[in-house]
Each structure stands twice: as structure tokens, then as C-alpha cells.
Amino acid sequence: MSDPYSFTATTPRLGLPNLFAAQAQKEFTVNEAFALLDALVHAVVEGMADNPPPSPVDGECWIVGSQPGGEWAEQAGRIACRQVDNWLFAQPYDGLVVYDRSAGQIARFENGWIRASRVLEPTGGATQDSEARAAITGVLAALRDARILPAD
């Protein structure tokens, strides 16, 4: 017979709370885990901000900026998710990808939030190759359409 597993209080990647035998009010633990999963699976954030919006709606999420205040104090870099009129905070992990609505692009976490920077299209020059220029412009358009690069 194999040894029983010994679980920590939270899961290692998402920080979801684990249940324990004879635990009181298990529904709170389970509901917190569901709320975190709801926020982090196919994550969408409204943008990045240092302070909570004045009238948040349940279900909206934000990346907390580097100088947080108010209800977000001491939560820099985390994802703030509005759940049942309260803020729930999730610590991002390397590889987490979110879609940022305000920027219209993907943000990826790797020791901090990373976004693709704008790439300028080729212009001018002594010798212009129209086929190369058209190909590069097409690649840039495809990267923008895929939300890998920000839209113009």
C-alpha cells in the first residue's frame, strides 16, 4: 500500500486552497478556489492600475501596478479580481498569460509583466525592395491580428 499524500494548505502553482478532513466551513475554501480558477483560466484583465476602479463589477480583474494604494496596498504585481464585492488577489507565476483589454494585447508574466513593444514598419532607404516591404508588413499585420504585438 502506498503512503498517503500529505498536502500543504495551498496548491503550488495557483495557490488554490486545499480541503482537509474535518475542516469547518469547507464551502468557503472550495468557493475561494473556484473564484481563483474563474479569474485565472483564460484570464482577461481590464488593464494595469495602482488603485481600484471607483465602481468595480464582480468578475473584472486588474494587474496591480508598482505603487498600489487603497484596498490594493501591498499587492504590487498581483492580479486583483472582484468577487462578491471584495477583492481577491492572485500571485502570478512565470508563464501566466493574460489578455489586457485596455492595451488590446497579451501580457505575459516572467519575473514581472512583459508586453511586446511596438515594431516600426520599414520606410525609406536608398534602395527599396517592394516585395520585402510587403512581406514584412504582412508579418507585422499577422502579429497584430494575433494580439502578439499591440495594434496601431
Image (cartoon, helix red, strand yellow):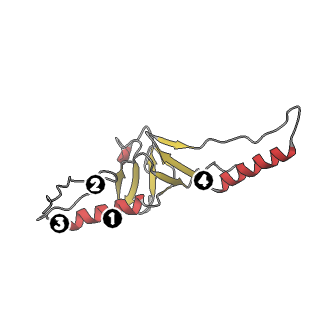
At label 1, the amino acid type is Phe
The span from disc 1 to disc 2 (Cα, nearest Å) is 13 Å
The span from disc 4 to disc 3 (Cα, nearest Å) is 40 Å
Question: From this viewpoint, which residue is outermost toward the bottom?
Answer: 27
- Can you give x and y, in whole percent of width and height, for residue 35 in the image? 34, 62
- Can you give x and y, in whole percent of width and height, for residue 104 in the image? 60, 53
Instruction: State the residue position of label 2.
Output: 11
Residue 67 quadrant: top left
Question: From this viewpoint, which residue is outermost toward the top?
Answer: 126
The residue that appears at 71% across and 48% down in the rendered structure is 140
At label 3, the amino acid type is Gln
Question: From this viewpoint, which residue is outermost toward the left?
Answer: 22
Instruction: State the residue position of label 1.
Output: 34
The span from disc 3 to disc 2 (Cα, nearest Å) is 19 Å
**Secondary element at image label 4:** loop
In depth, the one of 95 and 150 nearer the eye is 95
Circle nearer the N terminus (3, 1): 3
Which of discs 4 and 2 lies nearer the camera? The answer is 2
Instruction: State the residue position of label 3.
Output: 25
Circle nearer the N terminus (1, 2): 2
**Secondary element at image label 1:** helix
Residue 84 in sight from this viewpoint: no
The span from disc 4 to disc 2 (Cα, nearest Å) is 31 Å
- Can you give x and y, in whole percent of width and height, for residue 98 in the image? 49, 53
Q: Is 85 placed left or right of 105 in the picture?
A: left
- Residue 124 in the image: above or below residue 95: above
Q: Is 20 placed left or right of 124 in the picture?
A: left
The span from disc 3 to disc 1 (Cα, nearest Å) is 15 Å
- Residue 111 in the image: above or below residue 92: above
Instruction: State the residue position of label 4.
Output: 104
